[in-house]
Image (tube, rainbow, N blue to C red):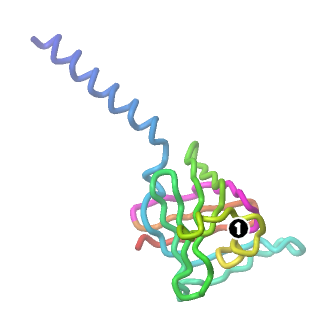
Amino acid sequence: MGKYTYIILLSVVMALAACSVETDNVDDVEGMWHLTKIETIDSETGATITENVSDKMIFWSFQRHLLLMEYKEGGAAAVLYKTEVKDKKVALTNPRVDDRENGDPAIESLEPLVPYSIDTLEPVLTIVSAKSSKLVLSTDVRKYYFKKF
């Protein structure tokens, strides 16, 4: 009987390991996050400029393969992205204005992304740190600091 128990236990462990490979970091970013701080590297001086945005109501909500960015009090349009999380990277693609009545129109310029400090239409963010209540994402020139909401 001990031999069969070992085989069953090994099978369960292998099945669980296979499941974690499939979700690859998705749970690290899943949920609603309040943007609290942005650090930007100045292209001329190389100095880091820190902007405290904790008083602004900017939220990024990740749900599996979607990201919804909302600026609750800033009057900016909400933005939708398709996401792919893999190898500690979050690729944002297919940006759209969250406007279901008009078919969620595609974003073709950076203007709607400026309130969210996004400077390219389809950025790839690196997961610097992901803990239960804090998240840090980065690009080549910015770090975004979030607190779980």
Amino acid type, label 1: Arg
- Please provide the residue range marked out in magenta: 119-132
Write the residue at 55% across / 86% down.
56
- Residue 106 quadrant: bottom right
Q: Find the residue positioned furthest to the right.
A: 44
Q: Is residue 35 above or below residue 95?
A: below
The quadrant where residue 39 appears: bottom right
Q: Where does the image place residue 123, in percent across and percent down from the top left? A: 70, 57
Q: Is residue 129 magenta?
A: yes
Q: Within 10 angstroms of label 1, few (less than 14), some, or many (20 or more) residues? A: many
**With 77 as the anchor, is 140 left or right in this view?**
right
Tell me if 133 is positioned left or right of 125 in this view: left
Q: Position of residue 128 (x, y in %)?
A: 58, 57
- Quadrant location of the C terminus in the rendered image: bottom left
Image quadrant assignment for residue 114? bottom right
Q: How many labels sit on residues?
A: 1
Percent x, y for residue 140?
A: 75, 60
Residue 14 is a magenta residue: no
Q: Which residue is mark 1?
A: 142
* Image position, residue 33 (x, y; %): 47, 70
Q: Nearer the viewer, residue 111 or 30?
A: 111
